[in-house]
Image (cartoon, rainbow, N blue to C red):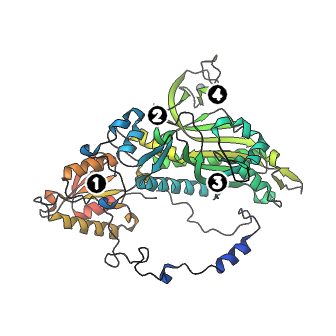
Amino acid sequence: MRPPAGTSVLRFRSEWFLPRSGMEGLLRRWRGFPGILLANCPLPQHPLCRPYHHPPGRVKRLVLSRFFQPQNLREDQVVGLESRSAELTCKSQRLMLQTGLIHPAGPGCYHYLPYTIRAMEKLVRVIDQEMQAIGGQKLDMPTLSSAELWRATGRWNLMGRELFRLQDRHNKEYCLGPTHEEAITCLVASQKTLSYKQLPYLLYQVTRKFRDEPRPRFGLLRGREFYMKDMYTFDCSSEAAHQTYELVCDAYGRVFNRLGLQFVRVQAAVGSIGGTISHEFQLPLNIGEDVLAICSNCSFTANVEKLDPKQPNCPVCQGKLTETKGVEVGHTFYLGTKYSSVFNAEFVNAQGKPALVEMGCYGLGVTRILAAAIEGLSTEECIRWPGLLAPYQVCLIPPKKGSKEEMAIELMETLYDDITEALPQLQGEVLIDDRTHLTIGNRLKDANKLGYPFVVIAGKRALEQPRHFEVWCQSTDEVVFLPKQGVIDLLHKIQVV
Ligand SMILES: [Zn+2]
């Protein structure tokens, strides 16, 4: 396994992006703030202050019956889903609705429910690790983006009806940011003493973005609100900026490799972002809205939008092109000085002269990657996750109450404690399906549908000597019977992020 990024010692470096201003005042304000520590809470019965009711030293067991997860899993509970079936347009959307991962809120808008948030947080950790491994620094820009910024680059008109526009009480105009080239360039331009020694800067954020899609569909694949990672890079020369461009593209490749997702990087049109070089990262999926041309002879791949329709062969080697559908999950642009020249984003070069920074911008669709991964890996009936992103890694299923094996319910609780004690990395990753009024078979069906990578069952053989648990490895479709230590050894291999 790759060592996690960020394990090396960080030293304060002059190239850290630290705008000089305001920090002193902020610290002063915090010192004057009355204590908000929970220990000082005057209400000992306040729910936040009440100690957890579980034995000291033990981690509280996660039980499925307490989860906020609207369950449409049981066939007798599929009420309401039928009536919406006309809107269900692809597998990932249908499965995510059925299993309570998302809940519709309006056209192209969804509530992301707890399982989805866990998977998304894991995805963001993978992205953070890979971005920070190449020197990325994370920040967070406002969603409210002023019209002045967008007018400066001409995009207030160019973006047309895709922008969600609004006005404040002073009639000042804003949009809900779909992308942040203007905002970040303006921010960097405000740093008046930037030296070539500090560059490159690789600044990024993971935030909610907005786009007024004419036809939102496919669930999280094409929504009007979505999460995106957007990175903007600032270099002191065109050559350096091209190197940074390749560095970020390679990091994107590592993100998809770690998730086990097959991707293609294709030449793309620059569209409304502009610039001169652009690539898309596409997951080949047959519901995709993009058509990709792949050369059977060399490594040439391109979005067909980019190709001359009169020229049917590969422009590099004249080989035959085959077409496949894809879902765009990442997009990179080499921008040059398109934005820095508008906002006068300058640095002082080695000759002591001011010069414009050379920029690139790079997007990864966070919620789209999640949905596309589910689309690509799942069967028609069951969700399958990239192993690293599974919301929970292990589901334990104790026997049904009142069954011959009822005694094994307690064995399962002990197994839970033993797993999380022996493998502390799995704390928070193991849950018990405590709906013991249901048969093991029914709960196994649900677990299979939700796609926990490992499902452990305490059935008849858990009461025999020696005791054996039944373990379902969902990614390989294998079922094995193992004693307790064997279960722990098997789960030891799980990678978590
Ligand atoms: Zn070719």
- Circle 1/circle 2 CB separation < 8 Å: no
Gap in Å between the C-alphas at discs 3 and 4?
A: 27 Å
Q: Residues within 10 Å of mark 4 (few under 14, many from 20)?
A: some
Element assignment for label 3: strand
Gap in Å between the C-alphas at discs 1 and 3?
A: 37 Å
- Residue 311 appears at what percent x and percent y? 63, 18
* Residue at the image point whose x is 37% and y is 42% from the top: 95
- Circle 4/circle 2 CB separation < 8 Å: no
Residue designated by label 2:
285
Q: Residues within 10 Å of mark 2 (few under 14, many from 20)?
A: some
Precedes in sequence: disc 2 or disc 3: 3
Precedes in sequence: disc 1 or disc 3: 3
Residue 69 horizontal side relative to residue 303, left or right: left
* Residue at the image point whose x is 55% and y is 65% from the top: 7
What label does residue 306 carry, if any? 4
Q: Quadrant of ligand 1?
A: top right
For this rendering, which residue is in front, 11 or 273?
273
Element assignment for label 1: strand
Residue designated by label 3:
204
Instruction: Classify mark 3 as within 8 Å of ligand 1 or not, answering yes or no.
Output: no
Gap in Å between the C-alphas at discs 4 and 2?
A: 19 Å
Precedes in sequence: disc 3 or disc 4: 3
Q: Amino acid at mark 4?
A: Lys
What label does residue 455 carry, if any? 1
* Residue at the image point whose x is 41% and y is 57% from the top: 495
Gap in Å between the C-alphas at discs 1 and 4?
A: 46 Å
* Residue at the image point whose x is 55% and y is 57% from the top: 129
Q: Residues within 10 Å of mark 3 (few under 14, many from 20)?
A: many
For this rendering, which residue is in front, 266 or 466?
266
Q: Residues within 10 Å of mark 1 (few under 14, many from 20)?
A: many
- Circle 3/circle 4 CB separation < 8 Å: no
